[in-house]
Amino acid sequence: MTTTLFTICNTGILFFWVLLLFFPKKKFTQAVMAYPWVPAVLALFYGYFLFSSGGLEEADFTSLEGVIQLFKNATPASVAAGWIHYLAFDFWVGCTLLLWSQKQGIPHLVVVFPLICTFMLGPLGVLLFVIFTRAYRALKPKA
C-alpha cells in the first residue's frame, strides 16, 4: 500500500507541474495556483505516511546528529512522508513564484528553467528565480 500511494503522489504531481510549465495562463491552472488544494491533498498522504511510520515522537531536530538518526531509523513510510513533504512545499513555492512573475509582467520563458529547478532542486530553483527575474528586470528596455 505504501508503494502504491507513494507512486500516486510522486507521479500525480507531474500533472500539476505540467500545468505550471506549459499552461500557466489557463483558467484551471490559475485556479490551481490560487489556493493550496494540491498541497492540501498531498498533506493527507503525508499525514498517513507520517503516522503509519510511528510519527516523530523520538525525533530530535535540534542537532545534525539528531536529524542523521532520523535517516538511520527510516522506514518506507517515513521516507515517503519526507518525500511528500518536499513535493507539497516545492509545488506551493512554484505556484507562488509563478503568480508573482505573472503579476510583475515577467515573461513565462524567463521563469520556466527556475520553475523546473524548483521542482527538482527546491531552494536552488528559488535562487535561480531571483537571479533570472532580477536580471530580466535590469536588462529590460525602459519604456
Image (cartoon, rainbow, N blue to C red):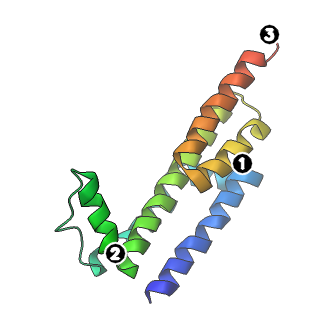
In this view, the mark in front (3 or 1): 3
| Separation (CA) of disc 2 from disc 1 | 37 Å
Q: Amino acid at mark 3?
A: Lys
Disc 2 crowd rating (10 Å Cα; few below 14, some 14-19, many 20+) is some
Q: Which residue is mark 3?
A: 142
Task: Tell me if residue 82 comes above or below residue 143 in the rendering.
Answer: below
Q: Residue furthest left?
A: 57
Mark sitting on residue 13: none
Asked which secondary structure carries label 3, the reply is loop
Which residue in the protein does label 2 denote? 74
Q: Where is 50 relative to 143, above or below?
A: below
Closest to the camera, between mark 2 and mark 1, is: 2
- The answer to whether residue 95 of the structure is visible from this angle is no
Tell me the CA gap for discs 3 and 2. 54 Å
Return the residue nearer the eye: 128 or 97.
Answer: 128
Q: Which quadrant is home to the C terminus?
A: top right
Q: Residue at the front extreme?
A: 65
Residue lying farthest to the bottom in this orientation:
1
